[in-house]
Amino acid sequence: MNFRSLACLALAGLCACPAKDDPTTTTDEATQTSADTTSQPTSAGPTDTSDGTTVETMDGPTSAPGTDTTADTTTGGNEPDVCACIDDEAHFDTYTCPAGPCGAVTIDCDVELGEETPGCEGIGGVFTIDEMALGCSLDRLIAGDEGAVSFVITSNGPGSGGGVAHILPERQAMVRFWQFYDLGGSDTNAGIVALKDAAYFEDCKTKLDLAERYACFRAWNASEPPATCDEASSYEDL
């Protein structure tokens, strides 16, 4: 074997041996690989939307295109939620939500005890009232605490009636009154109006005569209610 052949063999051996310090990837390559991995969005899985469509969300849930995620405080997009408390198919005592922590202020007009007394006007009988529930309800009207205050008139004669003020924020209330006599009756609009101010109800509490205190209590709205939730109606021979 001549010198040229030996040189070629030596060079071939050197080329076949990898360098010890040669990494499989460079620092720049590793950095790029890491950035590519961490920058990819992760899927939170499919999300069902209110209209029945499914949206694949990235980095947490999103709404379907064109969907407003703001909480809707109305029913049907037009009426306040409190209108759901009114049964607009009924004709008497149409408020269906809970009476509130005070319970309804119960007035009894006993026609067997004598002639009509103050507090039972239009119904007849002798007036009595649940004084504790009345005081509790006046306190809620003073404070503007949300929820219902109401009264119910019972009688062993032909008449009865009632009213409700479902207190809302900023001293607003959904208000309705109703009355029933013999075979017919009526109810007012069910709508949202301003309540009278706290000083008015504080003055009600100072009235010593219970019939006067009750009359003051039930005059809670500052104006007649509009038909926000339901229109007024009258009915006979039900």
Image (tube, helix red, strand yellow):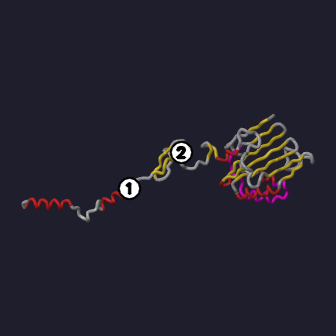
> Tags 1 and 2 in contact by the CB under 8 Å rule?
no
Q: Which residue is mark 1?
A: 37
Quarter that holds the C terminus: top right
Inspect the image, locate mark 1, and give the three-letter code of the amino acid beneath it. Thr
Apparent side of residue 144 relative to residue 158 in the rendered image (left or right): left
Q: Which residues are magenta?
A: 190-213
Q: Position of residue 217 (x, y in %)?
A: 78, 53
Apparent side of residue 230 relative to residue 130 in the rendered image (left or right): left
Q: Position of residue 73 (x, y in %)?
A: 61, 48
- How far apart are the two marked residues, 1 and 2, measured between alpha carbons? 30 Å
- The image shows a total of numbered marks equal to 2
Quarter that holds the N terminus: bottom left
As rendered, which of 156 and 161 lies closer to the eye?
A: 156
Secondary structure under tag 2 reads: loop
Viewer-nearest of discs 1 and 2: 1
Crowding at mark 2 (Cα within 10 Å: few <14, some 14-19, many 20+): few
Q: Residue furthest front?
A: 1
Residue beneath the point at 53% across and 47% down: 68
Q: Position of residue 153 (x, y in %)?
A: 82, 47
232 is higher (above) or lower (below) than 201: above
Q: Is residue 194 magenta?
A: yes
Q: Residue furthest left?
A: 2
As rendered, which of 231 and 130 lies closer to the eye?
A: 130
As rendered, which of 158 and 64 lies closer to the eye?
A: 64
Residue beneath the point at 44% across and 53% down: 42
Q: Which residue is mark 2?
A: 49
Which quadrant holds residue 181?
top right
Q: Position of residue 9 (x, y in %)?
A: 13, 60
Inspect the image, locate mark 2, and give the three-letter code of the amino acid beneath it. Thr
Q: Residue furthest bottom?
A: 21
Residue beneath the point at 76% across and 47% down: 163
